[in-house]
Amino acid sequence: MRVNTGKILKNDKSLLLAYDHGLEHGPRDLNLQTVDPKFNFDIALDGMYDGVITQHGIAEKYYKSYYKDIPLIVKLNGKTSLPNISPISKQLCSVDRAIKLGATAVGYTIYAGSPLEPEIFQEFSKIVEQAHDYGMPVMAWMYPRGPGISDEDTNVLAYAARMGLELGADILKMKYNNDFEGWKWIVKCAGRAKILISGGEKMLEEDFIRKSEEIMKTGVAGMAVGRNVWQHDHPLAMSKALRKIVHENMNAHDAEKVYEAEIHKQK
Ligand code: FBP
């Protein structure tokens, strides 16, 4: 079965823009500017991202023909942060609907270690089967979560990465726990599944740029960032710096200069 990851991974590297927070976290992550999905699709286009991630509702209303150069990744499951239930995020959109919306790939969150893991695995496996029949890549958010499960533990993260590979995911979206050496092992455990790291909560520009350089040095394939791009005052300058780090192995020092130069140009 040939899965075409080439539109999202360029020379096995990728920088994606994530914008599914309106459902996952609610408007607390958004402001008057970022609440408009168009603002974020424009960043994805002008920032030359390798893909943009949204829920199907946003894709249907905002992924217009002029954005077609940015591959769309439709998140097939989702949940809010409101109910206090066991970690599970059920499928809300089919692979066929994602294709009709123009998706190049589909995404799904797996809560590794959840008491509802069997149900999650079964749902995910059907998605892999359907998407791969179309040659469509599947991206899995491998987030360890559940009673007694730590998403900071390198062994648990390595297990989650391996799970993603075993379950047929092509790309894994994971959170970095700052264990630089440990991540080299996590990358090995993922085998041919490519890992992209989430951005996390917004931090100072220089800190995020430095962290991104460290992340790329672990051997992961790239980053799938949300808040650390679109919550920033200069999202396009940050995008350019990240692109240099991810696609050109630029170091943080030089990437910061790129960031400053971009801001200067915009003035
Ligand atoms: P950020 O880069 O903004 O951290 O986004 C990453 C992400 O995976 C989003 O795609 C998703 O909405 C969110 O984090 C979910 O995180 P959590 O389950 O920890 O609230």
Image (tube, grey):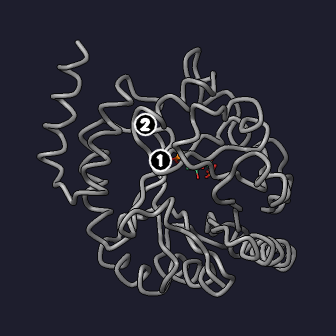
Q: What SS does tag 1 mark?
A: strand
Q: Is residue 189 left or right of residue 115?
A: left
Q: Is residue 239 left or right of residue 191?
A: left
Q: Is residue 85 above or below residue 193?
A: above
Front position in the image: 224 or 200? 224
Q: Is residue 214 above or below residue 28?
A: below
Q: What residue type is disc 2 on?
A: Val
Q: Is residue 265 above or below residue 67?
A: above
Label for residue 229?
A: 2
Res. 25 image quadrant? top right
Name the spot of residue 139 as percent of width and height, x first: 62, 65
Whether ligand 1 has any atom under 8 Å from the Cβ at mark 1 is answered as: yes
Front position in the image: 77 or 127? 127
Name the residue: 31% across, 56% down. Answer: 246
Q: What SS does tag 2 mark?
A: helix
Label for residue 191?
A: none
Pick the quarter of the image with the C terminus: top left
Name the residue: 53% across, 44% down. Answer: 70
Residue highlighted by disc 1: 225
Q: What residue type is disc 1 on?
A: Val
Circles 1 and 2 in contact, beta carbons < 8 Å: yes
Q: Is residue 220 left or right of residue 128?
A: left
Name the spot of residue 158 as percent of width and height, x first: 50, 81
Res. 125 image quadrant? bottom right
Pick the quarter of the image with the N terminus: bottom right
Name the spot of residue 110 as percent of width and height, x first: 70, 68
Whether ligand 1 has any atom under 8 Å from the Cβ at mark 2 is answered as: yes
Name the spot of residue 141 as percent of width and height, x first: 62, 63
Name the residue: 74% across, 39% down. Answer: 23
Real-space Cα separation, disc 1 to disc 2, in angstroms: 7 Å
